[in-house]
Image (spheres, coloured by chain):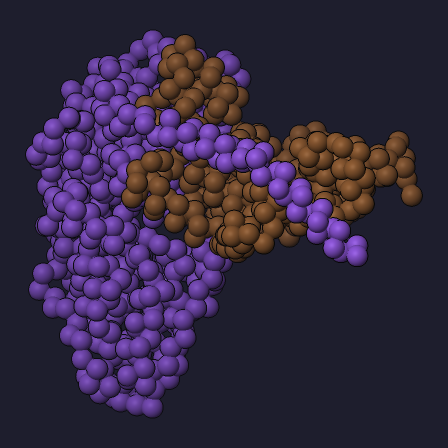
Amino acid sequence: MIDKSNENNDLMINRSLNRDTYWPTTLLMSLAALICCSCTSDNSQNKRSQKDLLVYCSEGSPDSFNPQLVTSGTSYDATANIIYNQLVTYKPGTTEIAPSLAESWEISADGLRYTFNLRDDVPFHGSQIFTPSRTLNADDVLFSFNRQRLSDHPYHGISGGRYPYFTAQSMGQLIKDIRKTGEHQVEFVLTRPESPFLSILATPFASILSAEYAKQLNRLRQPEWIDSKPIGTGPFRFERYEPDAYIRYKRFDDYFSENKRVKNLVFAITPDAAMRFARFSAGECDVMSYPLPVHLRVAQKNDLEVVQTPGLNVAYWAFNTEKPPFHDAKVRQALTMAVDREAILQTVYDRQATQATNPIPPSSWAYNNSISKVTYSKRKAMELLKEAGYENGFSIDIWAMPIQRAYNPNARKMAEMIQQDLADINVDARIITYEWGTFLSRLSQGLHHSVLLGWNADNADPNNFFSPLLSCNSAISGNNYAKWCNNQFDELILKGRTSSEQDERKQYYLKAQEIFKREAPWLTIAHANNSVLVQPEVSGMMVSPIGNINFEGVTLEQQSVDSGTQGVTP
Amino acid sequence: MFATLLKQLSTLVISLLGLTVLTFILSLQSETPVHQFQSDHVVVQYFEYLQFLLNGDWGTSSIHKRSVLKDFLQHFPATIELIVFAMVLAVTAGLGLGILASTRRGGWLDNTLMTSSLVGYSMPIFWWGMLLVLLFSLTLGWTPVAGRIDFAYDIEPYTRFMLIDTLLHHNQYGFAAFLNALHHLILPAVTLSTIPMAIVARMTRSSLLAVLKSEYIRTARSKGISKQRIIWVHALRNALQPILTIGGVQISIIMSGVIITEYIFAWPGIGKWLLEAVSRRDFATIQGGVLALSIIVIAFNLALDFIGIYLNPRLRRPS
């Protein structure tokens, strides 16, 4: 009975409500209207070019606005070529050294003294708290280097007091003294001849900051603002940074160079690569950083512009030479022969890379052309293993780096392919990954058998590959994860670093590459292209082999114009 | 009433203390200490830790050297904006759909709504978000892909609530900037609100159906009270009770949802901030962020309890 009456009750209410229950529909309708009223907003790309605004979809937030304090490429991109200048620079798109803040320089015959003549017409940016009273002079250079170099410098301890790049490159030991020899002249005195020195001075950590600004901040008792409210001499001045959202720059109209630039520059921080590409495709940004191979393929299919150049990088598979069976060069060679690198290039890089033969890329002047690449032959590999006494095979670990880098977009996939290749020659491989920090710290403890990694050079000198990755010193504490120490090789790269004649240096490096190939501490896999995606209305975009982004000379135009870059879509 | 409030508040204090104990233990494990303690004794250190927290010193990020608390407060408005908008969407649409379904129980509309709410409820949010972007942003071009506003609008972050900030820039851009910000908010909010909306709709339907069956509704009807009044004043108020309780649980779903949503839409809130910190092992930030998030969840639940007490006279007296 009760049930029945309840049902009746329901029904009656139902009927009576029928007329009045359209309000949710109305609500949804009004929501839809709201969506549509805002969806008719005009084309954002047009709006941007009216404002002369260029949006760059970048891959992450910078750690600091002072490149001296950091080592991440993302932080360098946001600072080194945007806000600051260095004494010397690379010619756009090349690895050649060119004048920048220093208009000329002399190197003493013994290679120990570098004298730089500074330009006398370089103004610094101004801001709400700082109005520069003078142009760049020797004091600014001294300030920028001494802050990193001298532990009793008033600014040394500011913002943590750690200068990772300066320390990692042992600049403290290398630079004996820096002297002001004139209002616009500085002299660097070195403790030993170091041929890559000019290349080193072109890297982000050697950016020049304002000594006058530092004084002003001391008066304001806010010295750490020097790193968060940056003042430099560069083509753009810093305007605002919203963490994880965007960085805004404005054109610096008094910039010492005449290069054309856009009025407003925005870095739209978008860490997810798929989302970055979606934003680019929807026209929300003009330039996109670190496209994945699949994006490049889609872009090329749709006639979007891909600006790319072979990068100064290498992806490699390093064998831990301290662990058997990898102490035996024959085993290492056998394994290098067993891997089908063509397939890796196809699958992992989507052909956006070249196969690597030497640890340095072909664009380097020290590249050894006479070394032939390892032939892929499982039969030969088996023979070698037999000679070494391992015909029954063995089992190893392959550590695959857990993060994605341009030079190694998918180490895990690579590891799986290598695993399959190795199975054919009776080598049983197990793939291991950890979270990135743990991965690195366990690697330096030498807990691995072999590891898939890569390297992106920070300066164009060949030494930047050999010393940090393959020297005996770096095997003890550094990035030599093959733990490989060959005395002959070590001697050669030391000579290459200290002699000042480039031709002489080249001979040493050529020889070193031969030893490297014979000893096979790594299987060199690929040199990936550095690439960015660019909308048609952007012109003048170039990609440096070094990898740091540069917006000098980049302009926006309504109609699509020939970009004049080297290395447009192949 | 007072005793109930007191009881609720003491639960709050106890859970907060428990939380700080947890984060304190976490901080002891980290390689780089977040705070420098004077004492060597762990218990004394804990009190020092509380002292630090109360003084607003939540540590400094090991990566970019900014104050964690300041960073949190900087990222929080973006998250609140997204959550509030998503919650309003979820509650209004969820209630509406729930009422609609309950009044047509068993009909095709009811079945469609309940099936789709089940689908919405079981949707993995990152996939759903991507799908929406694919459809509405890339295929149809109706909504922007990511971000909070078009960069053509240079908005000074006064309050960091984009909707408010754009209104404050009214002189410069009129309402165009505000509409643009709203436009950017739609897709993330829809993504985030899908699951709670489905839950609210289902809860409303079943709760309302249960209430409509009760005796007092019959009585009210027999007294000649209008049907609308029965639903809005008599039935809905009581039906809201369980919905509110579920709402409290929702906040933790929303919080985990907001982290993913922010990541997908490059939304510069605490979710993106925390994920970034996790991926870079920034312990100070993780620790401070987790503490702050938990405090918010607890505070939100408490606020809901108070609303529940206000709505239900029976709860005002302590049992």
Counting from the top left corner in percent of width and height, residue A450 is at 37, 70
At 37% from the left and 15% from the top, the residue drawn is B173
**The C terminus of chain B - image quarter:** top right
Q: Nearer the viewer, residue A425 or A514?
A: A425
Q: Residue at x 24, y 54 (%)?
A: A293
Depth order, front residue of B109/A179: B109
Q: Please determine whether, in this image, residue A315 is positioned above or below residue A161.
A: below
Q: Is the residue B221 above or below the residue A497 in the image?
A: above
Q: Residue at (79%, 54%) from the top-left corner?
A: A2
Q: Is residue A35 left or right of residue B294?
A: left
Picture coordinates of residue A528, whole percent (x, y)? 22, 54
The picture quadrant where one finds residue A43 is top left
Residue B106 appears anywhere in the view = yes
Chain letter for the purple part = A
Quarter residue A304 falls in: top left
Going by the image, does A283 lie left or right of B82?
Answer: left
Q: Where is residue A362 shown, x and y percent of the image?
A: 14, 55
Q: Is residue A500 visible?
A: no
The brown-tinted chain is B
Q: Using the image, determine if residue A135 lies above or below residue B218.
A: above
Residue that appears at 74% across and 48% down: B213
